[in-house]
Image (cartoon, rainbow, N blue to C red):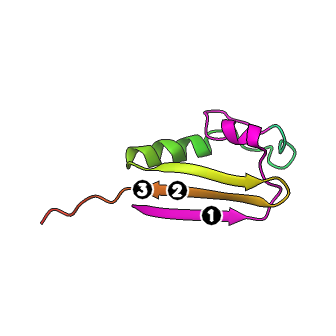
Amino acid sequence: MIKVSVSDSGCGISELDQKNLFKMFGFLDATRDVNTKGIGLGLHICKLIAQQFGGEVSVSSELGKGSTFTFSFLLAKSRR
């Protein structure tokens, strides 16, 4: 398994918004003024890709302190 985490020190994401974050067309209520150009597909697509490789995408966030997104993928066994 490979895990990659990306962190920021931005405004953070509320628990309520975290539940909708990976849904198709999932918009965030609390941060609507911060990012108004997206259409709510990016993280949903990331989730689908990670699942195709036997992994997942998750978020850990605290309002006012930032967020950490973690992506995991299973490595294929080599065929020798």
Left or right of 9 in this view: 20: left
* Residue located 68% across and 35% down the image: 26
Q: Please state which amino acid type lies under the numbered disc 2.
A: Phe
Seen in the image, is 62 located left or right of residue 54? right
Nearest to N terminus: mark 3 or mark 1: 1
Please tell me whether residue 8 belongs to the stretch shown in magenta.
yes
Residue labelled with disc 1: 6
State yes or no: discs 3 and 2 in contact (Cβ < 8 Å): yes
Q: Mark 3 points at which residue?
A: 73
Element type at marker 1?
Answer: strand
Disc sitting over residue 33 in the figure = none
Q: In this view, does 55 lie above or below 23?
A: below
Seen at 79% across and 45% down, the residue is 14
Residue drawn at point x = 39 percent, y = 44 percent: 52
Would you name the residue on which mark 2 appears? 71
Q: Is residue 35 left or right of residue 5?
A: right
| Label 1 with label 2: CB-CB less than 8 Å | yes
Magenta region: 1-28
**Element at label 2:** strand
Report if residue 15 lies within the magenta region. Answer: yes
x, y percentage for residue 68? 66, 59
